[in-house]
Image (cartoon, rainbow, N blue to C red):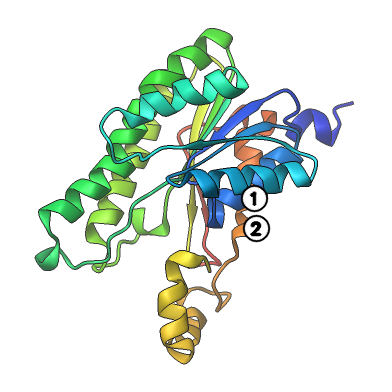
Amino acid sequence: MATLQDIFGLKGRRALITGSTRGIGAAIAEGLAGAGAHVVVHGTSENAAMAAAESIRSLGGLADPIALDLSVPGAGKRLIDDAEALAGPIDILVVNASAQVNAHLADLTADDLEFQLSVNLKSTVDMLQAVLPRMAERRWGRVVSIGSINQISPKPIVTAYAATKAAQHNIIQSQAREYAQTGVVLNTLAPGLIDTDRNAARKNADPKGWADYCSTVNWMGRAGQSREMVGAAIFLASDACSFMTGETLVLSGGL
C-alpha cells in the first residue's frame, strides 16, 4: 500500500526555486524542504539568499543559496548550471521569480517591457533549454511555473505582465507535450491576489481601500497567503502529479 510519503514525499529530490527569498517563493522553498527535498534558494541579493537558506536549515531542511539577476542575458542557463554544481542534478524546477511593472499599455516604456520579457520569458526559456534534456535523460522531472490569475483574466494595469504570464504558460504547455513520454511533467500554478510584499505599498498606503478591494476580488473576500500555495506546489512537484501535465492549477479564492 502506498503511503503519503511515497506519493507526496520528496526525499532525495533536488529542487531549484527561483525568486525564493521572500513571498510565495520562500514559502514554497520551505515547503519542499519540509517534504524532504534538497532545495536551492535563489534571489538577486546574496545576503537575502543566504538568509533564506539558513532559515530552512534552522528548521532541519537542506538548502543552498544562489544569487543571480535573471534579467541578464544567459542568466537562466547559468542558474541551472550553478544550482547543479551546488546540489547535484535538478529534479524539480519552480519558476517563481518574476518582474511586474504596473502600467497601462499607453504608459508602458520600452525598458519596462524589456525588463518583464527578460525575467519572465527569456530566462524561463534559458532554464528550460538547460534542464529539460537532463531531466528527460534521467526519466523523471517536475517543472512548476508560478503563473498568475492575470494570465487568464488580465487587468489593464498589468497588461504586459499578464501577457508574459500567458506566454510563459504557453511555453509550459508546448514543452509538456514535447516531454510527455519521458517522465517529465510541466504545469502552472496560478495564484490570485496574494498578500505579499509586492502588494505591501498599496496595502500600507490605503488600508481601508486595500480591505475593500480584497472583499470584492474573489468569492472568499480576502487575499490569499503565501503558505496557501505550498500544498499545491508539493503536489505538482511530486509523484502525485505523474499523470498531469500542461495544465493550470488556479488558487484564487474563487472567481
Q: Position of residue 46 (x, y in %)?
A: 49, 43
Which amino acid type is shown beneath numbered disc 1? Answer: Val
> What residue did someone put label 1 on?
230
Q: Position of residue 58 (x, y in %)?
A: 77, 46
Q: Is residue 81 left or right of residue 239?
A: left
Badge 2: few (under 14), some or many (20 or more) residues near its Cα, within 10 Å? Answer: some
- Residue type highlighted by circle 2: Arg
Mark 1 and 2 residues: CB-CB less than 8 Å, in contact? Answer: yes
Residue sticking out furthest to the bottom = 208
Q: Is residue 128 visible?
A: yes
The quarter of the picture where the N terminus appears is top right
Measured as percent of width and height from the top left, residue 235 is found at 65, 40
Q: Nearer the viewer, residue 137 or 247?
A: 137
Marks 1/2: CA distance? Answer: 5 Å
The residue lying at 69 percent from left, 49 percent from top is 55
Left or right: where does residue 185 sit relative to residue 237?
left
Residue 227: give its label: 2
Asked whether residue 213 appears in the rendered view, the answer is no
Element type where label 2 sits in the image: helix
Task: Tell me: 235 left or right of 103.
Answer: right
SS at badge 1: helix
The answer to which of 93 and 187 lies nearer the viewer is 93
Q: Which mark is residue 145?
A: none
Q: Nearer the viewer, residue 11 or 155?
A: 11
Disc 1 crowd, CA 10 A, few/some/many (<14, 14-19, 20+): many
Question: What residue sits 44% from the left and 13% below the top?
Answer: 133
Farthest residue to the front: give it: 47
